[in-house]
Amino acid sequence: MQVLAVLGGQWGDEGKGKVVDLLAERFDIVARYHGGHNAGHTVKFGSRHFALHLLPAGIVRGRPSVIGPGVVVDLDALEAEIEQVAAAGVPVGDQLLLSDRAVVILPYHRLVDAARERAAGAAKIGTTLRGIGPAYESLAARTAIRVADLFRAETLAARVAAVHAETGALLRALGEPGVPEPETVTASLRAAAARLERHVVDTGRFLRDRLRAGATLLAEGAHGAMLDLSAGTYPFVTSSHCTSGAVACGLSIAPRALDASLLVLKAYSTRVGSGPFPTELLDATGEFLRKRGNEYGTSTGRPRRTGWFDAVVARTAVELSGAEAVAITKLDCLDELDEIPISVAYRLDGRTVTDIPPLAEDVARLEPVLETLPGWKTTTTGVTRYEDLPSAARRYVARLEDVVGAPAVLVSTGPRREETVWRGDLPFLQGLPSPR
Ligand code: IMP
């Protein structure tokens, strides 16, 4: 076992940050392979609390941490985050490696993102307004400015001017009055690049060499399978691929280098932004889950929509990433409930449906088929041994394993590192050092 991917199996915010943090000490390198600072990973241990967006969670463990070519990078956000974790006692030194091929998010991308959302009104995606979509568009359109471009003064200015000319017209059409001058943008990019230069390398070459030499790698997913650009609830998705298929392209390593995938699933469901959400609860129970689970965005502070666990979503995500195992998070947030429904299928136009339909308007019409499990009505917060969980909680976990078709290797019973049930070492973790 050399390369493991940890991915989200729902709509993001499953608690990947905690799982990656727990596993990071067992791997030599941690790498982000897609997304940008739209992601939000919370890591808590002792009295310390880190809200990471762009930095791989391995940074907190002092591991070499790679931001791969599949990531879109806002240089100001990256610098702010480096300062923030340094202020919290984790100085970021040479262990941060930024790909020379990563795409730079420009102010124009941020403005286009916001202007489009404004113009869409009720039909908006509910993006994080960080410019993620337009930055990925620029890559596909072959007009992107990548990190390596920042160090070529003669071409950078021309490339920024070209983006300004193109997006300036679009921004004005969308009613955005303040389009920054290309000279100002270029100067700010060059200044940030000079400060970040020590981190910039060919991370693909670094990873391929290290893997050949036997190093282990944890690939840290962002978002979740249902936000995947192709497999998710399109168009209410993010602009990158969020399944294990993205690991190779996003890190410039071979697909066969990936040995296993661990899918992180919250014990219930949440979603931020617009888009269909079949098991959504719009009642007092939904509000209870939001408060109990502190379901407010790490990146944007937005209240998350809440709902019951959706087995079709989770099973599809297991299949899409070929996940060998799952991690169940936030089990303790269900402690107070009398009974806990999970959705095992849907009904649509009088038929039973067991796959996610391709059209968002049909996903919005799905009625969940609920199976109700008994609650345990006792605290599980901080439980660390599986046998110490109440039997109804163990039954709940076992039922989730059943419906998603993969074993739960860990169950999280609180936000802190310590509040975790490890269920022995599954085969895919063998050969790695044990968790401390
Ligand atoms: P974008 O990624 O900012 O373009 O937003 C597209 C959609 O993905 C919106 O519904 C966002 O709320 C959602 N999204 C993006 N990143 C995350 C995340 O890390 N957690 C949850 N939702 C996310």
Image: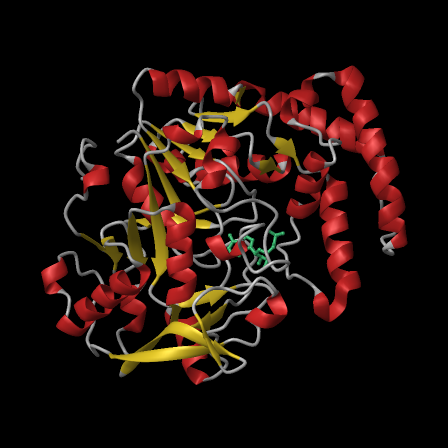
Quarter placement of the N terminus = top left
The quarter of the rendering in which ligand 1 is drawn is bottom right
Whole-percent x, y for residue 190 in the image: 71, 24
Q: Is residue 167 above or below residue 433?
A: below
Q: Is residue 254 above or below residue 58?
A: above
Residue 30, by quadrant, is top left
Position of 423 with respect to 281 (left or right) is left
Whole-percent x, y for residue 155 in the image: 78, 19
Residue 114 visible in the shown view = yes
In this view, the residue in front, 413 or 405, is 405
Whole-percent x, y for residue 391 in the image: 13, 71
Residue 402, by quadrant, is bottom left
Farthest left residue in view = 387
In this view, the residue in front, 412 or 216, is 216
Residue name at image x 59 percent, y 40 percent: 77
Whole-percent x, y for residue 3 in the image: 33, 32
Position of 23 with respect to 391 (left or right) is right
